[in-house]
Amino acid sequence: MTDTLWLEVSGLTVDVLTGIYSEETHLPQPLRISVRAKLAMADHYDPTTPLSRSKNYMHLKFAATEGIPKDVHFVLIESVADHIIDTLFLQDEKVEEVEVKIVKLAIAEDGEEIGITMRRARK
């Protein structure tokens, strides 16, 4: 079995211009976004290992919040996930794989989670 390191940020609520129906296309919708990034691991992490051997998890948060353009309408939430993945791959070559889960909060009626999970490995 190979050792793996996943950085995670989950449960972010972000307002994003998205949707295909007329009632969705004029105002941002709240999305719950979670991001996982698989990183190339160091051989060992001792107490003095510098951050450069990992990744600042705030970069994941930025990609899923401030990194999403406020003036762009994403027809599909799949394209929001794609944008987040591209952002993380561009940020850091140590990122080997990214998983993004997006839940559309505006259409939930009884607390269910309706949305997508997209995972992509670096090509």
Image (cartoon, rainbow, N blue to C red):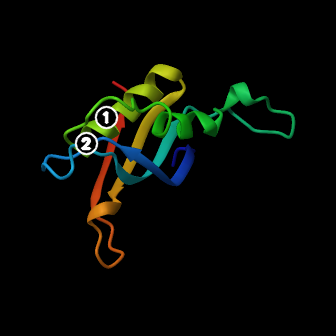
Q: Residue at x 35, y 61 (%)?
A: 105
Whether residue 93 is visible, yes or no, is no
Instruction: Count all numbered tags in the image, as a single digit.
Output: 2
Whether label 2 touches label 1, CB < 8 Å: yes
Which quadrant, please, contains the C terminus?
top left
Q: Quadrant of residue 121?
A: top left
Q: In x, y percent, where is residue 98? A: 42, 39
| Relative depth, front residue between 20 and 37 | 20
Q: Residues within 10 Å of mark 2 (few under 14, many from 20)?
A: some
Q: Amino acid at mark 2?
A: Glu
Q: Which residue is mark 1?
A: 82
Image point (54%, 35%), residue name: 62
> Along the line of sight, which residue is nearer the eye, 20 or 27?
27
Look at 21% across and 42% down and name the residue there: 76
State the residue lying farthest toward the left.
21
Which amino acid type is marked by label 1? Asp
Residue at disc 2, secondary structure: helix
- Indicate whether 34 appears above or below 63: below
Which residue does the numbered mark 2 point to in the structure image?
Answer: 78
Residue 66 at what x, y percent from top left? Answer: 50, 33
> Could you tell me residue 68's position as x and y percent?
41, 33
Real-space CA distance between mark 2 and mark 1, rounded to the nearest whole angstrom: 6 Å
Could you tell me which residue is drawn at 50 percent across and 39 percent down?
38
Instruction: Give the quadrant of residue 69.
Output: top left
